[in-house]
Amino acid sequence: MKSRAVRMYGTDDLRLEEFELPEIKEDEILVKVISDSICMSTYKLVKQGKKHKRAPLNMDTNPIIIGHEFAGDMVKVGAKWENQFKPGQKFALQPALNYKGSLASPGYSYEFFGGACTYCIIPQEVMELGCLLNYDGESYFEASLGEPMSCIIGGYHANYHTNKQNYQHAMGTKAEGNILIMGGCGPMGLGAVSYGLYMENKPKRIVVTDISDDRIKRAREVISEEAAAEKGIELVYANTAVLEKPIDELMKITKGHGYDDVFVYVPIRQVAEMGDALLAFDGCMNFFAGPTDNQFKAEINLYNTHYTSTHILGTTGGNTDDLVEAIDLAAKGLIEPAVMVTHVGGIDSIAQATRNLAEIPGGKKLTYTQFEMPLTALEDFEELGKTDPLFEKLSGSCKRHKGLWNSEAEKILFEYFGV
């Protein structure tokens, strides 16, 4: 069977090309990919090339398929898995395999397994680990966004607080606590806000910082303070670039208590140091942002670590339980992964968008791999709709959904392109 894919041969070397897939083995599954959202981690892979820890050294002769936030339909199931999976089923995928100590992962390491393609082959280790999931949700894009949401959920679950009586760790963010999400008006930060409003350990307050009034404006449009208040949570957006004394003013919001849980969503030294300074007693800071510099450092206050039990950790990726939770919450409408999405495109837009991801404004770039379409910002739909009937329909659909991408808009695309 032929597949069309964006394949990587080396640093910044991405090519959209057609090639022949081998026949699947009895322990493999052939899938049709429908949606694949672009991750900043893929951008880092493309910039590092063979230096990336997950990249194979022979990619110049055996190129890998990029993309790991993908969903689609099962086409052919090997005999080993016939009792568990069936052709025609939708699937979601947890790409953080960690199989027998290997760093190999879809979108980084495999010649025939990745998301930026029309068809690919899922190897046996994915099913063995339970990382291939049946998906019953209405839309494909929410399954794609299940992966980044699982990373966010994993971060929330990994935070912890201590019990001085017996030193047991209470896992997760602190119930009725103060949460600070720094650099939180980007796609992942907004996902974190969305999850924070519905999780079990409900906080009393979530403060979200950014340095862009435009990003804060959009954040307020998709997750408003009023909507959070209806759930019993105080939501505050703050532009730290215009605050004269940002640490003092952010501390004042908590009435001097500080923040029980801090998430740093941008790899900037000053932001990390500010987060450390804002920790409450027994506060936990999660350095969530992944820097490209392997020597990235910041100063922390070890006096506070000693006397006020502050602690710092980092998380990357989520596990399968996190993905199951993400998909379940999205299917029930309890979280809105769509708050991440600001652009939509086809398979032909993936290579250029990935190479230039750091320079393209906005949030998640969501792509559909079964057709060609320029990468287009949702905010441009209305203007394009004045002359293009497709974008007129897409604009109307997004307006009916708070300006967000949605399953109705996805179906409009599928009908237009015959998916």
Image: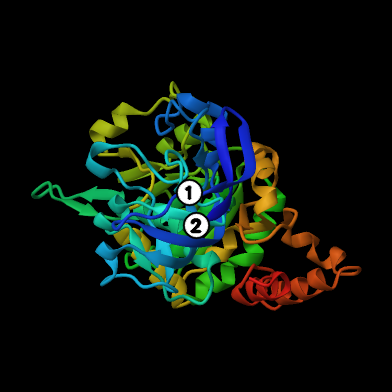
Residue position for label 2: 70
Residue 204 in view, yes or no = no
Q: Residue 385: percent from the left, percent from the top?
A: 85, 69
Please name the residue shown 86% across and 64% down the image.
383
Is disc 2 surrounded by few (<14), some (14 to 19) or many (20+) residues within 10 Å?
Answer: many
Distance CA(mark 2)–CA(mark 1):
8 Å
Q: Which quadrant would residue 54 be assigned to in this image?
A: top left
Residue position for label 1: 114
In the image shown, does 71 or 271 lie closer to the viewer?
71
Circle on res. 9: none
Q: Residue furthest top?
A: 295
| Direction from residue 252 to residue 363 in the image, left or right | right
- The disc, 2 or 1, on the residue closer to the chain's N-terminal end is 2
Q: Is residue 148 above or below residue 220?
A: above
User: Helix, strand, or loop for circle 1?
Assistant: loop
Judging from the image, the colouring scheme is: rainbow
Q: Which quadrant would residue 397 be assigned to in this image?
A: bottom right
Q: Residue 47: percent from the left, percent from the top?
A: 57, 29
Type of amino acid at the residue the image marks with label 2: Phe
Q: Residue 305: percent from the left, percent from the top?
A: 28, 33
Type of amino acid at the residue the image marks with label 1: Gly
Please name the residue shown 55% across and 56% down the image.
36
